[in-house]
Amino acid sequence: MSQMDIEASFPRLPTHGYVITSPATTEYNCIAWAAQDIDAWWWPDSLQLYFWPPDIPRVETLDAFIKAYESQGYSICHSSDYEAGWEKIALYVDINGKPTHAARQLKTGYWTSKLGRLEDIEHKSLDSLAGTQYGSVSTIMRRRK
Amino acid sequence: MTYATSTISKKLALDFEISDVNDMAIGEESAFIKKERTRSVEHYLFPFSRKWSTPFARFHMLKKEWEIDTAVKSSISEIVIHPAYQQIIGMGPTAIPFILSEMKIKRGHWFWALKSITGEDPVAPSDRGNITKMTEMWLLWGREQGYIR
């Protein structure tokens, strides 16, 4: 896949600004990447084939995803603005409220995302990934660095 | 399809997949030309009239469609519910050697299909989500079952 394919899926990216920061890989996904795990693909699938934090319900609900990140030390906050000393993540949901994506804030205030089995990117705004693929940002969480 | 044609098809299909992985350093125009070349060769190898003529051709057409449509997805349920993936599962045991051959050259989310078709899961619970280990365990299973050498 190429830059063109990424931009076809996320048409706002070129105008909002982004850079590709890794090769494509299937080793981890956005949910793992947001939690700084590059060794597993996280998902609460019903066949229990993929990683999901222990004791967190294996269901595809926003509540379960929030609990999964709470198990990693995050708690809900109300601003996506950069705050020194805090690491923030953003959870995206589709129109049915089902989680689709997670992004992690960098110390520049920009965001980093793993795009499915494609590359990691650094993007300036959360809104640049909003749309038909990932829906919109629903929840911001943070933890102490 | 003759054996010779089948071998060439497999080799070219392999070339496409390998070339997919290393396209970061090429320019946008080169990427476009490469994509069009791939499409041309693919149309030559798999004209519409022959798309469903062999299980191998069918598998690769479905795989390609599934990979393109789910490339940016993180959700395993969205990845495996794709109609092309479901059709691969629907091929039953016929698809197993194609899936395992694919896993030998390129990692992908074939675990759901393999478990659905075979009813087995050789992956240890502690390795859930570790794509490298999951792939290794399924390839080992494939060797033990005589699907691959």
Image: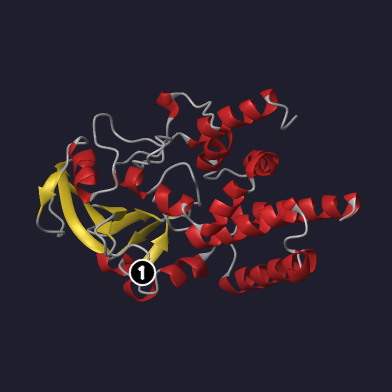
- Total numbered circles: 1
Residue under the point 73% across and 70% down:
B48
Furthest toward the left, the residue is A78
Q: Is residue B3 above or below residue A138?
A: above
Q: Judging from the image, what secondary structure is the residue with disc 1 in? A: loop
Q: Residues within 10 Å of mark 1 (few under 14, many from 20)?
A: few
Q: Nearer the viewer, residue B44 or A104?
A: B44
Residue B3: horizontal and vertical position, in percent? 89, 49
> Going by the image, does B43 lie left or right of A69?
right
Please identify the quarter of the rendering in which residue A130 is found: bottom left
The picture places residue A144, in percent across and down from the top left corner, at 14, 40
Residue at the location (46% across, 66% down)? A6
- State which quarter of the image contains the C terminus of chain A: top left
Q: Residue at x 32, y 36 (%)?
A: A52
Pick the residue in front: B119 or A90. Answer: B119
Badge 1 amino acid: Thr
Which quadrant holds residue B62?
bottom right
Relative to B134, is B10 above or below?
below
Q: Is residue A142 visible?
A: yes
In this rendering, would B115 be left or right of A87? right
Name the spot of residue B7 as percent of width and height, x first: 84, 50
Which residue is labeled 1 in the image?
Answer: A132
Viewer-proximal residue, B38 or B10? B10
In the image, taking residue A10 as reference, residue A145 lies left or right, namely left
Name the chain letter of the residue that bears numbered label 1: A
